[in-house]
Amino acid sequence: MKVNKIVKTLLVVSAMSLLAVGLTGCGKKGNAESSDPKTLTVQFVPSVNAGSMDTKIKPLQSLLSKQLHMPVKMTVATTTNTMVEALGSKTLDVGFLPSAAYVLAHKQYGVVPLLQAQRQTRDANEGFTKKLTNHYYAEVVVRKDSNIKSLKDLKGKKIATQDTTSAAGYIYPAVEMQHEGINLNKDCKPFTVKGADQGVMSVVNGNADAAFVFEGARSIAAKDDPKAMTDTRVLYKSTPIPNDTISARKGLSPKLDKKIQKAFMDIAKTKHGREVLFNIYQHNGYVKTSNKDFAPMKSYIKQANNLNKNK
């Protein structure tokens, strides 16, 4: 009888030990599945002068914090590449990623697209219409008095570009120049500037013969110098490019992803929110998106990568 009691006692103790281990394991698994931050970090790429963007994003930081009921820290990245790496290393939670950079970030690090920006379309004079769209265009800008009449005339010229992950500032113009038989890296003299407005001003000031920019960059630069519009012209406009994304790093909980989606969409529905968003990136609203919306971009990125391999 004593032996049976001892055996029973050992069985009970063993069962309780296994249960405790199992519960501990479950707890660890739950934490691993959701690594939501206490402070949400959000970053932007400097599409215009980085210093001016620091000021522009502060009102959005406050609005988003109120919507999410949690602290938010917003900063401006040095380059698009550094933002992608930060999302990959999970030192950054959310990034306003251009579409080309999103495709790379998704492939390399499983970054998730939460929203796609909507912008007003532009008329021939770069003024806004009331129609919203999910795409935009790259432009090649030259001086108004330049004798450059086509992409082929860019051979041997100095061209201001953005970094190699920029759709409008590099990928689309470079690839479409290649379609015309002009290799940007071998036939031209490209150099990198930070911000499309700086690309336009490089042309105005004679430091570049042409610049790769997004549609509307001239009107933005003209706020500081009217010559950005009066002394330049658009040589070429690309095929449509998917609009920017608001993307999240891999590992945020689905619940937080949805809260971030809703927060930005709600901000864009208010007059003050729209003004803040427009002031930063000329966004007029957001729609939900998925990876399939960026499929055409993959072909352009592949062609641009091949172009860069043969420098």
Image (spheres, rainbow, N blue to C red):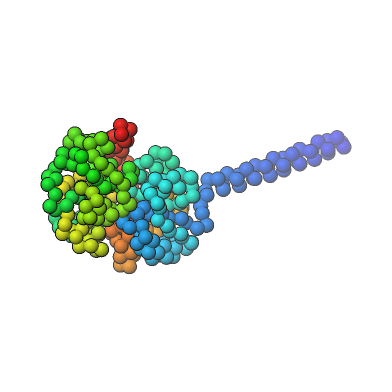
Residue at point 62%, 43% (across, down) = 25
Question: What x and y, as percent, mark residue 146?
Answer: 14, 49
Figure check: 145 above or below 176? below
* Res. 176 image quadrant: top left
- Location of the C terminus by quadrant is top left
Q: Is residue 118 visible?
A: no
Residue at point 17%, 54% (across, down) = 232
Q: Residue furthest bottom?
A: 272
Residue at point 44%, 45% (across, down) = 85
Q: Is residue 208 visible?
A: yes
Question: What x and y, as percent, mark residue 259?
Answer: 43, 56
* Res. 268 image quadrant: bottom left
Figure check: 307 above or below 211? above
Residue situated in front as seen by the camera: 169 or 67: 169
Count of numbered circles in the view:
0
Question: What x and y, as percent, mark residue 117?
Answer: 30, 53
- Location of the N terminus by quadrant is top right
Figure check: 311 above or below 219? above
Q: Residue furthest right?
A: 2
Residue at point 27%, 56% (across, down) = 197
* Res. 2 image quadrant: top right
Judge from the rendering whether residue 21 lies leftward or rightward of residue 90; answer left or right: right
Residue situated in front as seen by the camera: 22 or 147: 147
